[in-house]
Image (cartoon, rainbow, N blue to C red):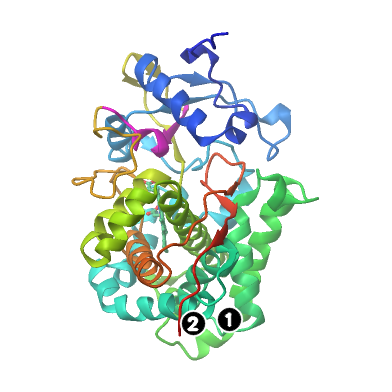
């Protein structure tokens, strides 16, 4: 029996079930789109965030690397202000959670400006030893175990500890609650993360927890500002005005979610990829210091931890023959661009020596380029260095993936390794 090769007409990116399919099938579908119909139109995405009578807008998809870079670098055509996910959130929920990632200039530039210094690559370089220390401590805590779920043992904890220090979160219950909220916010499409909750209940519940953290910490940070990011945010002024409490809460929510969930899943994808391609693991292990930088870039390309961002056209524009009208939703599929045959030789090969590696896992450039790229790279470099020098035979080939089209999530990653001798 022969299986019919799908054409672009068979591919429905709006179907929630598409996002529950094996990654290889999804990648193959995007390869068909890139070849046959690189800027397709789709019906409204399946969504539980809005009642069906309000979920009426379809969307264009950009699947090519070049087109995503173009859209990312032309915010005057492709606005972020109407939302950044293919599924629309009710406006009030967007306002309480997305802050400047869902804004255009000039407000975007002002708010992003507060944090720029903290996240500059040279500051990250300064923090490298400190981040490496967190990674070393964490691997020391688990290296003797020989087995366990890598997500629970490491992926959840490392970004949580680093983020906590950045914001001056005191260790303890508040810290735990904050990181837990940050790491479940983006799971609104995943049955396992949602449990009995609706998508809106899950999302809003997690966001309210993050807001509560800000409410708890604000009075003290206002009275005694320290050298942490929340204290900077509280003091920052624009045209003589400070941010309101609501603005601070949304700002904190954006940073908490953007920093925690992405790096959590990226670290799990790294261990998974090296388990699936042991030849690449052996290469890394043979020269961790020499190969870790290109390995990190390949993990980012391979995993595309954020699968998409969305824009809204504010003027008519034609891309590869598709006539996008002002007001249309446009989705930038990074996961597809990172397998684009026109850019990457042998794109379906996980190759840690790939160089150059112009992946766009952190976005296609332009004003919204990931603020935390340097931090994420430093964290991944530190983690891979610790893991592959101390428990190099770690193997975890069987993930339990999240069902999601925004975050490329891994809920669970059972791992085994030879315990480290002490
Ligand atoms: C592997 C980890 C990460 C990946 C793959 C990732 C990816 C991305 C992507 C694709 C964007 C959107 C770019 C665009 O729209 O053009 C973004 C934006 C952003 N990221 Fe990350 N990110 C990661 C880690 C982090 C970390 C650690 C932080 C720390 C705070 C962070 C903070 C942000 C913020 C604040 C934005 C919004 C920037 C803006 O709108 O100006 N990210 N990230």
Res 21 quadrant in image: top right
Horizontal side of residue 367 vs 80, given as left or right: left
Find ligand 1 in the image and state its quadrant. bottom left
Going from N to C along the chain, the mark reached first, 2 or 1, is 2
Q: Residue at x 18, y 45 (%)?
A: 356
Q: Is residue 47 above or below residue 102?
A: above
Q: Which residue is mark 1?
A: 217
- The answer to whether marks 2 and 1 mark residues whose Cβ atoms lie closer than 8 Å is yes
Seen as rendered, the residue at the extreme bottom is 224
Q: Is residue 218 above or below residue 7?
A: below
Give the mark toward the camera: 2 or 1: 2
Horizontal side of residue 324 vs 298, given as left or right: right
Per the rendering, the mark at residue 168 is 2
Q: Is residue 333 above or below residue 92?
A: above
- Does 158 appear in magenta? no
For label 2, being within 8 Å of ligand 1 is answered no
SS label for mark 1: helix
Q: Residue at x 72, y 50 (%)?
A: 194
SS label for mark 2: loop
Res 169 quadrant in image: bottom right
CA gap between label 2 and label 1 equals 10 Å
Which stretch appears magenta? 328-341
How far across and down, in percent of the image, does residue 294 sit? 25, 54
The quadrant the C terminus occupies is bottom left
How far across and down, in percent of the image, does residue 43 sit? 58, 21
- Residue density around tag 1, few if under 14, some if 14–19, many if 20 or more, within 10 Å: some
Q: Is residue 369 visible?
A: no
Per the rendering, the mark at residue 170 is none
How far across and down, in percent of the image, does residue 279 sit? 34, 49
């Amino acid at each position: 029996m022969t299986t019919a090769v799908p054409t672009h007409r068979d591919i429905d990116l709006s179907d929630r079930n598409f996002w529950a399919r094996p990654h290889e099938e999804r990648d193959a579908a995007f390869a068909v789109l890139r070849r046959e119909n690189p800027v397709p139109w789709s019906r409204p995405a399946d969504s539980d965030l809005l009642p069906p009578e309000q979920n009426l807008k379809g969307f264009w998809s950009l699947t090519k690397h070049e087109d995503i870079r173009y859209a990312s670098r032309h915010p005057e055509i492709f606005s972020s202000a109407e939302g950044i996910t293919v599924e629309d959130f009710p406006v009030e929920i967007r306002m309480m959670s997305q802050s400047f990632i869902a804004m255009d200039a000039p407000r975007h530039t002002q708010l992003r400006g507060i944090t720029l210094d903290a996240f500059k690559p040279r500051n990250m370089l300064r923090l490298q030893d400190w981040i490496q220390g967190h990674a070393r401590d964490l691997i020391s805590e688990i290296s003797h175990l020989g087995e366990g779920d890598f997500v629970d043992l490491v992926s959840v904890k490392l970004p949580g500890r680093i983020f906590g220090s950045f914001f001056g979160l005191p260790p303890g219950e508040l810290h735990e609650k904050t990181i837990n909220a940050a790491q479940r916010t983006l799971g609104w499409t995943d049955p396992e993360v949602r449990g009995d909750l609706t998508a809106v209940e899950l999302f809003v519940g997690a966001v309210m927890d993050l807001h509560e953290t800000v409410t708890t910490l604000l009075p003290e940070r206002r009275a005694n500002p320290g050298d942490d990011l929340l204290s900077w945010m509280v003091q920052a002024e624009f045209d003589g005005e400070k941010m309101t409490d609501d603005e601070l809460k949304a700002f904190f929510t954006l940073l908490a979610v953007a920093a925690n969930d992405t790096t959590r899943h990226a670290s799990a994808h790294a261990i998974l990829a090296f388990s699936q391609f042991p030849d690449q693991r052996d290469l890394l292990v043979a020269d961790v210091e020499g190969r870790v930088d290109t390995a990190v870039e390949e993990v980012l390309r391979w995993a595309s931890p954020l699968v998409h961002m969305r824009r809204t056209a504010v003027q008519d524009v034609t891309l590869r023959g598709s006539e996008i009208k002002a007001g249309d939703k446009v989705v930038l599929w990074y996961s597809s661009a990172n397998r684009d045959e026109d850019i990457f030789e042998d794109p379906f090969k996980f190759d840690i020596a790939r160089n150059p590696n112009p992946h766009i896992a952190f976005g296609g450039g332009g004003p919204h380029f990931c603020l935390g790229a340097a931090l994420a790279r430093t964290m991944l470099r530190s983690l891979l260095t610790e893991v592959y020098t101390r428990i190099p035979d770690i193997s975890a080939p069987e993930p339990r993936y999240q069902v999601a089209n925004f975050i490329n999530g891994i809920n669970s990653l059972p791992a085994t390794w030879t315990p480290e001798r002490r």
